[in-house]
Image: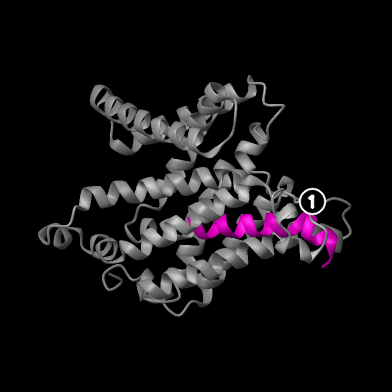
């Protein structure tokens, strides 16, 4: 692992790991609150917001994307409520129609937009493009302490590290109210905890993680990052702190193993070209979840309908 590894693989692997960890931190609470598909919904809703932010600003920088994603989320909530009330349909149907329609609109607008100057096209939006986040200025491992080389790091690395750090700190600071509201919301309300604000804050954290992870895994495969590591971790322990720790381990293993297998796996099997890193990361995280479902020490208790609470 010399200069070529540092230039081409080190930064993408770090960014993919940070993205997976950021999504797993929020995903733990979504899974426990039986809101795992909120991650799916967010991944669909943020796309038109990101595309709209790009059309307005002409850049793919963080704040415009976050604002665009937030506005798209508000629009989605308004549309769901309108469809539910006017059409008198069940909330699940209203959400399905809204999320898929907004996602399709985002794809159509993206196809008609000139994004040749930035890494933003339909394939990138769907599957990410973490392989492109290389560090050309690196000249071996010594570059990680070279200020001149560090200045040329892809900006996505700092953005993903900031988001992952903020989510980790927020999880630690709000641990107690998050824990109580996740397992017993009426009890949390009786203690005076703002359960509504906690729920909105959790969804907002998931939206921030989804937008930050956009470059790494796209708006579709990010769903696996929200669900698979926390789901596998839930099958390993009944303790929340240990579950979060397990999910971080599974997220990092998925990112690193997925990236390596995407680049070298096809070559080992005799194929000439590599495959999508994001797709392989999602595949590895799914395999880890499958193994946990088969051999996880808490799989029976989770599966039991009455005693699993």
Q: Position of residue 80 (x, y in %)?
A: 32, 30
The image quarter containing residue 263 is: bottom right
The image quarter containing residue 112 is: top right
Q: Position of residue 64 (x, y in %)?
A: 49, 32
Camera-side residue: 5 or 223?
5
Number of numbered tags placed on the structure image: 1
According to the image, label 1 marks what residue? 137
Question: On the rendered image, what quadrant is the C terminus found in?
Answer: bottom left
Q: Position of residue 17 (x, y in %)?
A: 60, 60
Camera-side residue: 180 or 14?
14
Question: On the rendered image, what quadrant is the N terminus found in?
Answer: bottom right
Q: Residues within 10 Å of mark 1 (few under 14, many from 20)?
A: some
Camera-side residue: 131 or 144?
144
Residue drawn at x 75%, y 54% as measured from the top left: 149
Q: Position of residue 11 (x, y in %)?
A: 69, 56
Q: Which residue is the extreme one toward the bottom?
A: 297
Give the SS element for disc 1: loop
Looking at the rendering, the stretch of residues picked out in magenta corresponds to: 1-22
Lateral position of residue 171 relative to residue 100, left or right: left
Q: Please check the rendered image and state whether residue 95 is part of the magenta-colored stretch, yes or no.
A: no
Lateral position of residue 153 relative to residue 87, left or right: right
Does residue 27 lie above or below 299 as drawn? above
Does residue 190 lie above or below 308 as drawn? above
Residue drawn at x 28%, y 50% as measured from the top left: 199
Of helix, strand and loop, which mostly describes the magenta segment?
helix
Residue 265 visible in the snapshot = no
């Amino acid at each position: 692992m010399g200069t070529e590894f540092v230039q081409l693989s080190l930064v993408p692997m770090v960014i993919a790991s940070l993205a997976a960890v950021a999504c797993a931190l929020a995903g733990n609470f979504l899974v426990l609150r039986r809101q795992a598909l909120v991650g799916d919904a967010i991944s669909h809703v943020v796309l038109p917001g990101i595309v709209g932010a790009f059309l307005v600003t002409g850049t793919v920088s963080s704040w415009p994307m976050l604002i665009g994603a937030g506005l798209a989320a508000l629009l989605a909530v308004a549309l769901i409520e309108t469809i539910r009330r006017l059409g008198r349909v069940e909330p699940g149907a209203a959400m399905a129609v809204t999320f898929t329609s907004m996602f399709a609109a985002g794809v159509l607008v993206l196809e008609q937009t000139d994004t040749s100057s930035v890494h933003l096209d339909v394939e990138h939006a769907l599957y990410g493009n973490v392989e492109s986040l290389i560090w050309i200025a690196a000249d071996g491992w010594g570059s990680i302490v070279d200020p001149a080389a560090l200045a040329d790091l892809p900006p996505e690395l700092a953005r993903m590290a900031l988001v992952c750090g903020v989510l980790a700190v927020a999880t630690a600071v709000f641990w107690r109210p998050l824990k109580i509201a996740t397992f017993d919301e009426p009890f949390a309300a009786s203690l005076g905890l703002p359960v509504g604000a906690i729920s909105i804050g959790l969804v907002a954290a998931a939206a921030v993680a989804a937008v930050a992870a956009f470059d790494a895994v796209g708006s579709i495969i990010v769903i696996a990052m929200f669900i698979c590591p926390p789901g596998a971790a839930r099958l390993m322990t009944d303790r929340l702190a240990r579950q979060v720790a397990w999910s971080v381990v599974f997220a990092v293993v998925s990112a690193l193993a997925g990236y390596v297998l995407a680049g070298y796996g096809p070559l080992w099997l005799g194929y000439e070209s590599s495959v999508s890193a994001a797709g392989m990361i999602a595949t590895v995280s799914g395999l880890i979840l499958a193994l946990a479902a088969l051999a996880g020490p808490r799989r029976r208790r989770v599966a039991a309908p009455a005693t699993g609470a």
